[in-house]
Amino acid sequence: MADSLLQIEKILERIKEKKIELQKLVSINGFNNPTVLRCSEELDKLIYQFQLIDHSLSSYEMEQF
């Protein structure tokens, strides 16, 4: 479980960094730029990874009761 918490911390940090990158790209290139869209997709994937880990932790915690 400690490994999962470490994974969550790392993913949250990567999400934070990707959000900043995306905001910068949008301010320079607008919303429809291919680079912006690619960065947005990368952010979506990170968020999905976070949700998977968070869900598995929640399921594990529920099994402990």
Image (spheres, helix red, strand yellow):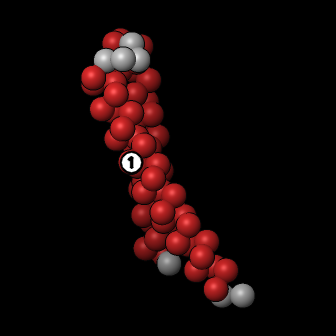
Residue 43 in the image: x percent, y percent? 40, 40
- For numbered disc 1, what is the local secondary structure? helix
Q: Which of 8 and 60 is in front in this view?
A: 60
The image quadrant of residue 27 is: top left
Residue name at image x 52 percent, y 72 percent: 56
Residue farthest left in this picture = 34
Residue farthest right in this picture = 65
- Residue 63 in view: yes
Q: In this view, does 47 lie to the left or right of 33?
A: right
Q: In this view, does 61 lie to the left or right of 49?
A: right
Up-down relation of residue 57 to residue 63 (above or below): above
Q: Three-letter amino acid code at disc 1?
A: Lys
Residue name at image x 31 percent, y 18 percent: 33
The image quadrant of residue 21 is: top left
The image quadrant of residue 7 is: bottom left
Up-down relation of residue 16 to residue 53 (above or below): above
Residue 41 in the image: x percent, y percent? 36, 38
Residue name at image x 63 percent, y 79 percent: 61
Up-down relation of residue 62 to residue 16 (above or below): below
Residue 36 in the image: x percent, y percent? 34, 24
Q: Which of 20 and 58 is in front in this view?
A: 58
Residue 58 in the image: x percent, y percent? 61, 71
Mark 1 nearby-residue class (10 Å; few <14, some 14–19, many ≥20): few
Total numbered circles? 1
- Residue 13 in view: no
Up-down relation of residue 20 to residue 10 (above or below): above
Label 1, on which residue?
45
Residue name at image x 72 percent, y 87 percent: 65
Q: Is residue 40 left or right of residue 52?
A: left
